[in-house]
Image: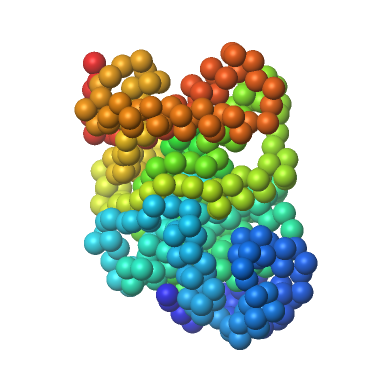
Amino acid sequence: MDCEEIKTPEEFSDICPYNDEDFPREIAKLVKEPGFEHAVRYVMPEVDYKAFCQQLQQIHNKHDFQLQIMLPFLRQLEKETTSGVTASGMENIIDNTPNVCISNHRDIVLDASFLNLCLTLHGKPTTEIAIGNNLLIYPWIDSLVRLNKSFIVKRDSSKRHALEAACHLSAYIHFAIEKKHQSVWIAQRQGRAKDSDDRTQESLVKMLALAGDTNIVNGIKPLNMMPVSISYEYDPNDYLKAKEFLLRKKDPDFKKSQHDDLLSMETGLLQNKGRAHFHFCPCINNQLQNIPVDCDKNEAAHHICNIIDKAIHSNYYIYKNNYIAYDLANDVAHFSEQYSDDDKKNFIAYIDSQISKIDLALSDDDINYVRHMMLIMYANPLANQLTAKGIVQQ
């Protein structure tokens, strides 16, 4: 993993990862937090917490923190909760060329963590990670993520201060890429696409360009944007997402609680995900040249989002579950050659078992609705890939 040498200016101190000189102070505070101890013991039940804290206090920079703490933890998590994390497209990562890695968003914690695991195992520098402050429920979580090369996206700014926060974030990302020569990861949208219909938000592209040239295309070119396509065989949060769809259907004003976010993080982190695959697409700069020069900002942002989305959609790894869900959701048998009767039976049993975890009194109509929404979650990556590749199903 990479050592960061350029100190971040004070103007970004409210959102940036900790500078290495801050490590002793921040780790000394972190290990005294009861909430941190509880979390460590929860995710690592066999841990010798005292010895673990002593190990932490010997660490003085982000490089060693990721190598000595995060890498073993992620390898153990990979072993216990997946059937393997794999990657492709590594040839698209050019040495000494930092990128904004922009990906679809499935899991709150693990999208960026497993992405960095893939980079590490292939001898590539890790990325800094964009994380919304809505997830920093406790002060010690803020400290932990900033020790682990994360920077903060302020999602609670008032409308009056939203543009200021966006400009500040954009300036930091440009600084990271252009001055620190440090790649960053950011999700293509705020929050996860609950139905797995992954679309890049135009507002995100506009934010990224703010600190660059006044022309939006020229403004994002220095960021060397690289789409990354993430594919999990199973989504442990699928039933929680289906539950949220049902609650919003019944009450359009429904809002998740902090407890809901914590449960989603815990479930995604610790439950089975099957196989996980990450594909690193080529930098989009060459394709940006095809955007008409007379486009206004909105049209240009739309073109850029389409480029990103097509790359992500085209490079999903498609599992048997996706083929089965597509056929079931659409009441067809287009992909029946891709799976056996037993595969189909097992997937239906999996969906039913996930539905049984929903802690609501469900009517028959409710059950049919959440089942359909879960099928859509697994079908959409295939549906979007077919569209991206120009394949039409009759």
Q: Does residue 331 show up?
A: yes
With 125 as the anchor, is 240 left or right in this view? right
The C terminus lies in quadrant: top left
How far across and how far down the image is residue 283, in percent?
A: 31, 55
Q: Quadrant of residue 11?
A: bottom right
Which of 107/171 is in front?
Answer: 107
Colouring scheme applied when the structure was drawn: rainbow
Q: Residue furthest top?
A: 365
Question: Percent x, y for residue 77?
Answer: 49, 60
The image shows residue 278 at horizontal and vertical percentages of 36, 52
Residue at the image position 67 percent from the left and 65 percent from the top: 41
- In this orientation, which residue lies closer to the viewer: 308 or 134? 134
- Position of 390 relative to 139 (above/below): above
Depth check, front residue: 234 or 344: 344
Residue plotted at (28% across, 55% down): 88
Q: In which quadrant of the rendered image does the N terminus lie?
A: bottom left
Give whichever of 89, 311 is nearer the camera.
89
Residue 121 position by quadrant? bottom left
Residue 161, horizontal then vertical, whole percent: 70, 49
Compared with 156, 222 (above or below) is: below
Say if residue 23 shows up in the picture.
no
Q: Residue at x 59, y 29 (%)?
A: 356
Q: In the visual, does 382 lie left or right of 378?
A: left
Question: Which image quadrant for residue 251?
Answer: top right
